[in-house]
Image (cartoon, rainbow, N blue to C red):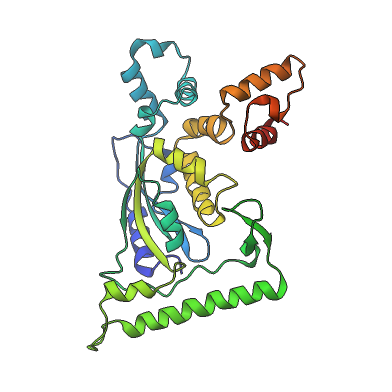
Amino acid sequence: MPLTPDQIAEIEAARANPRQTLRAVSEGMEAHLYRAMPVLDHGFVRVIDYMGDDSAIVQAARVSYGAGTKHVQNDEGLIRYLMRHWHSTPFEMCELKLHVKLPVFVARQWIRHRTANVNEYSARYSILDREFYIPDPAQLAAQSTVNNQGRGEVLAGEESARVLAMLKSDAAQMYDHYEAMLSQDGQQGLARELARMNLPMNIYTQWYWKVDLHNLFHFLRLRADPHAQYEIRVYAEAIAACVRDWVPLAFGAFEDYRMGGVTLSTKAIAVLKRRLAGETVTQEASGMSKGEWREFVEVWG
């Protein structure tokens, strides 16, 4: 069950008692507020709170940059200008707080984004639930032969079944031992802070994660990318769906300039200019490394 009965009751109570406010409100985000979006087999993402909207970005920029920005025809044009020229502080005026339930190994990858505020469920004080991420067979893949950080061919038949069986049995056994070690019901056992060390990385944890929009866009650019690991990418995609409704103008600019755009090096620009002039340019003549040239060709052919 992604949500506990207590969490469901809390959400229903919060949504049943709307209050008037004088602060900026995003109708798109209000539709997401408190609702849990299922992710993976037991996980979820839900919006706990947010601050600001597209107008907050514009307001901050016009205070910061003064009369010069008044020549921009509209808010969308200004936001696109800010995104195009890599301004950051106006986007930091918007913040988002999420409640996320996720496997521990995904959390350890996620926490590398150190620009957020995080408070995680503590297994020192509480007992973790018997919930593990067990991949869908379509996500069971061998190691890529060309990318040390990626997956290759999907496992099939007996090999897929063998791996799934080991994942399930190992997780169940580790949790059985975890329960057996704990001090509970008056028995002399191990402290929770020690018993947790034997739990598998696919057990679920939860946290509250608060981040400003500038750093959230950086997170989404990396984690919602098709090359990102599937298990964190689906969380990023769920968050992106909320952000799209929250700040549609900023998200549109983000999609255009960050997700859909490319950054060119000085050498790449020189190659494009030579190509436009009709010259055939090889990797050896470009001054780029083989890796740079491969990435260049993937985009420009």
Q: Is 239 in front, or is 153? A: 153
Q: Is 188 in front, or is 185? A: 188
Q: Is 187 in front, or is 19? A: 187
Q: Is 69 in front, or is 144? A: 144
Outermost residue, front side: 284
Residue 28 shows up from this direction: no
Position of 228 with respect to 32 (left or right) is right
Residue 237 position, x and y percent, is 53, 48
Against 136, residue 217 (above or below) is above
Assign the C terminus to one quadrant of the image: top right
Asked which quadrant contains residue 187, the reply is bottom left
- At a point 35% along the width and 28% down the height, the residue shown is 89
Against 202, residue 144 (above or below) is above
Residue 242 position, x and y percent, is 47, 45
- At a point 42% along the width and 63% down the height, the residue shown is 104
- At a point 49% along the width and 20% down the height, the residue shown is 77
Residue 36 position, x and y percent, is 44, 57
Against 205, residue 30 (above or below) is above
